[in-house]
């Protein structure tokens, strides 16, 4: 008799019954995995909005291009009295701020040698003159008198060089010598400010901007030591040619040629008239003085923001030949 067969074992299911029941539910199914959190969606839209605002802003706003360089204050109408002969200062006859007339002595130099020479020539001239009056027909004495007269005039001229006089009416601006100081020929002794003198700003800008510069452009100046005390001016004159460092020093003169450093490249000289002889700062009102340094900015052109950011757009907009 055969043995009874065991009942068949149920086949194992591939999925759990709970998973099958959940899959069979009629509710809406969600995503199995969420990679991006909610704050990243918000940040994305913020970035998109900022890009759009920046693009519109660049399209609507013009960006200025400036020519920048050093600037000096210069008083036009300033007369500098220089020594016409070398020597030691005997007396200084004026002080700063004093008003003088044309021809008034300013500084005297020691002239003992010149005075002795003039006295000698005068005595000899008088002696020859007396001899000529006794013998008017003596041609030799007459020729000697002519020569002595020339020497006397030369001696008087040398004596005149020992006294430096005011060339014009004005006010003493700066006294640059003291008693017993030795002077060389051409050295500045006293500066005089003429009546109606005006303060000007002299800017030295890079030569590459010369085609874009012309009178009427706005110029902004900030003096060294007075931060944020801006002076809004207008370009009055522009030099026709570019000049190098040596020519700039010659233009500024002996008193200012070392007051500003000029690069090796050529520069263009731009002048703007200052509205008054003083300026306002945060802590008071101050007067302008010759040689005061600073920085100047001249607005030479304005370009669209996209043109400034991507210069190739300007080329694409130009018509082709």
Image (cartoon, rainbow, N blue to C red):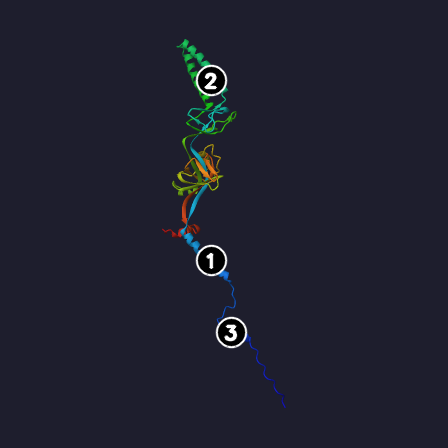
Residue at x 43% of width, y 33% of height: 75
Q: Which residue is mark 2?
A: 118
Q: Quadrant of residue 7?
A: bottom right
Disc 2: CA contacts within 10 A as few (<14), some (14-19) or many (>=20): many
* Nearer to us: label 2 or label 3: 3
* Disc assigned to residue 23: 3
Task: Determine whether label 3 and label 1 are within 8 Å by CB.
Answer: no
Task: Determine whether label 2 and label 1 are within 8 Å by CB.
Answer: no
Measured from the top left, where is residue 179 in percent x and y?
51, 25
Sequence-first disc among 2 and 3: 3
Q: Which residue is mark 1?
A: 46
Residues 212 and 100: in front is: 100
Helix, strand or loop for disc 1: helix
Q: Tell me if residue 18 can be seen.
A: yes
Cα separation, mark 2 vs mark 3, equals: 131 Å
Sequence-first disc among 3 and 1: 3
Sequence-first disc among 2 and 1: 1
């Amino acid at each position: 008799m055969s043995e009874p067969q065991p009942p068949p074992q149920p086949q194992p299911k591939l999925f759990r019954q709970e998973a099958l029941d959940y899959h069979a539910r009629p509710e809406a199914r969600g995503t199995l995995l969420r990679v991006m959190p909610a704050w990243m969606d918000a940040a994305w839209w913020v970035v998109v909005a900022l890009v759009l605002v920046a693009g519109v802003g660049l399209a609507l706003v013009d960006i200025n291009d400036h020519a920048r360089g050093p600037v000096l204050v210069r008083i036009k109408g300033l007369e500098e009295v220089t020594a016409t002969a070398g020597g030691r200062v005997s007396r200084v006859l004026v002080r700063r701020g004093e008003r003088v007339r044309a021809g008034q002595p300013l500084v005297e130099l020691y002239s003992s040698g010149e005075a002795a020479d003039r006295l000698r020539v005068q005595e000899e001239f008088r002696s020859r003159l007396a001899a000529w009056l006794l013998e008017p027909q003596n041609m030799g004495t007459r020729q000697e008198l002519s020569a002595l007269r020339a020497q006397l005039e030369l001696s008087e001229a040398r004596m005149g060089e020992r006294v430096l006089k005011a060339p014009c009416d004005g006010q003493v601006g700066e006294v640059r010598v003291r008693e017993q100081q030795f002077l060389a020929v051409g050295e500045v002794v006293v500066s005089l400010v003429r009546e109606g003198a005006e303060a000007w700003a002299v800017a030295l800008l890079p030569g590459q901007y010369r085609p874009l510069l012309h009178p009427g452009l706005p110029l902004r100046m900030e003096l060294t030591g007075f931060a944020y005390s801006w002076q809004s001016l207008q370009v009055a004159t522009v030099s026709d040619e570019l000049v190098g460092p040596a020519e700039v020093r010659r233009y500024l003169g002996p008193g200012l040629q070392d007051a500003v450093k000029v690069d090796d490249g050529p520069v263009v000289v731009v002048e703007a008239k200052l509205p008054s002889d003083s300026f306002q700062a945060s802590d008071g009102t101050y007067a302008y003085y010759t040689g005061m340094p600073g920085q100047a900015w001249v607005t030479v052109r304005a370009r669209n923001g996209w043109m400034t950011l991507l210069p190739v757009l300007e080329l694409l907009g130009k018509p082709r030949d």
